[in-house]
Image: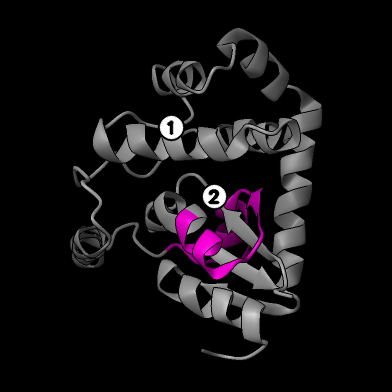
Amino acid sequence: MAQPVDFWVSIGSTYSCLSVMRIADVAARAGVAVTWRPFDVRRIMLAQNNIPFRDKPVKAAYMWRDIERRAQKYGLALRLPAPYPLAELAFANQVALLGCIEGWGQNYVRETYRLWFVEGLEPGKEPALGHALSAIGQDPDRVLAKARTEELAARLVAESDHAMALGVFGSPSFVVGSEVFWGDDRLEDALDWAVKGRPG
């Protein structure tokens, strides 16, 4: 039986768009159960002094072109570059965390990335929040009031610290037991490990 995979995803990570849009189908074909784990990647990156694209225009340009190439490979139609970086990264992920607790988190994260990378709406603020929640059948007023509580903020901090303790330092990351796989290009490796206990 395949081991489960924890999918550590942080809205605000650009490369995570590729995994968000394809992980459900890829994991289903592999017969692997996936748990989505929203966290605040910025908290970890600041703690580790790891800011990869700020003040690095050549690297940022490469990032957008690389994502564009990979999206074409997967058959994803994206409009790039998208708004970046995000001012409300933490709150976008507080909503995602609430969604995972209540059972609609995956749909929210997928719709948020679609709005971000196809329609150019910045996550974590209006109109993206209202559009994403309405599109998946959630009441924006109820969700946003609940997501803005100190309890949810504290839970996101706790989840982010837990991710860091596991060795997660970026998004997307896939954790299988004690093995950490970082980056969309390691998704298949993580699924192979979950099925076989070794690289494919």
Residue at image point 51% right, 39% down:
109
Q: Amino acid at mark 1?
A: Pro
Instruction: Identify the magenta region.
Output: 25-51
Quadrant including the N terminus: bottom right
Outermost residue on the top side: it is: 141
Q: Secondary structure at mark 1?
A: loop
From the top left corner, tell me how far across and down residue 45 is, in percent. Answer: 55, 61
The residue at 71%/66% (across/down) is: 4
Q: Which residue is mark 1?
A: 123
Q: Is residue 102 left or right of residue 180?
A: right
Percent of width and height locating residue 17: 39, 51
Camera-side residue: 196 or 120? 196
Q: Is residue 64 magenta?
A: no
Residue 168 falls left or right of residue 70: right
Residue beneath disc 2: 10
Label 2 secondary element: loop
Q: Is residue 65 visible?
A: yes
Closer to the camera, 185 or 197? 197
Question: Mark number for residue 55?
Answer: none
Task: Identify which amino acid the numbered label 2 is placed on.
Answer: Ser
